[in-house]
Amino acid sequence: MSEQQNTLSTIIVKALLDEAFKQQLIADPAAMFKAEGVVIPEGITVQVVADTESVRHLVLLAVGGGRL
């Protein structure tokens, strides 16, 4: 696993354990990723969503497998 994948995994776990962090991550992912040391390339927008009891999300990956 790359260092960036480790960092992303850490962010996910932190969001699962800390509701305030999760809400900040959903509201402003770019700022939260930057604070955690993740560089988002120019022209890329990150959206964070959370499943609920009644809503599930299906993510369709971009053709070409772009990365952060």
Image (cartoon, rainbow, N blue to C red):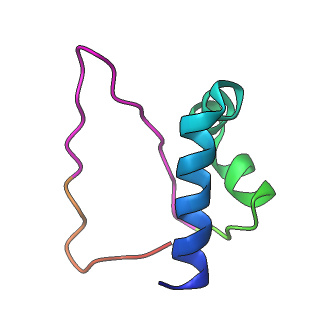
Q: Is residue 49 on the magenta stretch?
A: yes
Question: In the rendering, at what x and y percent does residue 35 appear?
Answer: 80, 55
Residue at the location (51% across, 74% down)?
5
Q: Camera-side residue: 65 or 55?
A: 55
Q: Is residue 4 above or below residue 44?
A: below
Question: In the rendering, at what x and y percent does residue 55 appear?
Answer: 24, 21
Q: Camera-side residue: 7 or 62?
A: 7
List the single residue furthest toward the front: 17
List the single residue furthest toward the bottom: 2
Q: Is residue 30 on the magenta stretch?
A: no
Q: Is residue 16 above or below residue 67?
A: above
List the single residue furthest toward the right: 35
Span of residues in magenta: 43-59
Task: Name the magenta segment's main secondary structure.
Answer: loop
Question: In the rendering, at what x and y percent does residue 11 appear?
Answer: 61, 53
Q: Is residue 11 above or below residue 23?
A: below
Write down the quadrant of residue 52 in the picture: top left
Q: Camera-side residue: 14 or 61?
A: 14
Residue at the location (68% across, 56% down)?
33
